[in-house]
Amino acid sequence: MKAKLKAGIIGAGFIANVHARAIRNSGHELYAIASSTPESAKVIAEKFNITKLFDSWQDLVRSSEIDVIHICTPNELHAEIAIAAAKANKQIVCEKPISVNTADASAIEEAVLNNGVGFAVPFAYRFYPIVREMRAKLLNGEAGPVHLMHGNYLQDWLAEPTSDNWRVNAVTGGKSRAFADVGTHWCDLMEFVTGDRISRLIANTSKAYQERNGIKVLTEDIANIIFETAGGASGTLTVSQVSLGRKNQLLLEVDGSMASYTFNQETPDTLLIGGRASNQIITRGNDTLTSADGKRLSHLPSGHPQGYQDAFNDFIADAYQGFQGNLVEGVPGLQDGLRSAALIEAVLLSAESQSWVSVPEAQSASQTKMLAS
């Protein structure tokens, strides 16, 4: 495998900018871009000095010069592009959800496994140093037996009735919006730090507005979920894209018999450890963190904040290591994308049936095979 991989981005929205910065930061080459219009592709190309503009995503995928495909398009295109990229023997970074239904997710899995390519999904919140510290403490048993996980993911970018976006469209974005867009981040983070898995859930979804700009809304603004885990814990999650004042609050609390642990994505450099007699706040830094992974991902001295782009940069760096055959533990891969698809389907089915729904575990190859080149 080459020491320096060439990347091509498909899409030119906000998240494409995040991917572009991370590719550059990783030391690999941001080589090409394709988008829905030549104008939008040109804006990103000029901003990041990208060498090659393709007229279509198909042309970009077919290019023999490109090693890694970054899929940053509306959700309805994810599966088609991912399958084509796998068949072209490209490594793949695909935004979540990886598809708008589980059938398409299974088709992606088949193509990726049959062609032996790498696949990574940007559940980038895993890459905050404080998250790795929290995970190490929970997996070391410092919380004692965990009996409750709870929290929320709240945003306000759709709080006004005139607010709109392609994600609101049930075809372009998929049948689930709020949960698929951000609730899956919370679930991935909870399962990652605890090592436990949601086994069944009951969900209620609702809309703040029945119409936006005269068009009927078919996707949820709000999702409330009660769940049970394979390890015997219970939990609750509230997801909203209409909560004024909350820009991007992913709040996760894990309660055990000996301690509780609280992470808030809007203040990602601190971890609250709750105790009966006193609470403790741990701040990020090599002089304050004890876990090897936390220290590895802590690039600045204590008191110098690290943020979302830093976490995304580390996700891309570790994913590319996997594409080159040097697997790094903790990189979210195809299994995690399939897990997300299963959770979305369970939430939609439960909300429709108003009943408890079991969440099946994927029965396929290991994460190692998903990421290896």
Image (spheres, rainbow, N blue to C red):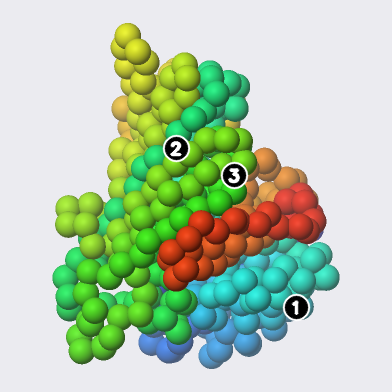
- Give the answer, above or below, for where 49 lies relative to 303: below
Count of marks placed on residues: 3
| Label 2 Cα neighbours within 10 Å, binned few <14 / some 14-19 / many ≥20 | many
Residue 187's mark? none
**Residue at 60% of width from left, 22% of height from top?**
140
Q: Nearer the viewer, residue 116 or 260?
A: 260
Q: Earlier in the sequence, mark 2 or mark 1?
A: 1
Question: What residue is shown with label 3?
Answer: 197
- Give the answer, above or below, for where 49 lies relative to 335: below
Q: Nearer the viewer, residue 367 or 101?
A: 101
Please, what secondary structure does the residue beneath circle 1 have? loop
| Label 1 Cα neighbours within 10 Å, binned few <14 / some 14-19 / many ≥20 | some
Amino acid identity at mark 1: Ala
**Residue at 60% of width from left, 56% of height from top?**
359
Please, what secondary structure does the residue beneath circle 2 have? strand
Q: 365 left or right of 226? A: right
Residue 7: give x, y in percent of width and height. 60, 67
Residue 88's mark? 1
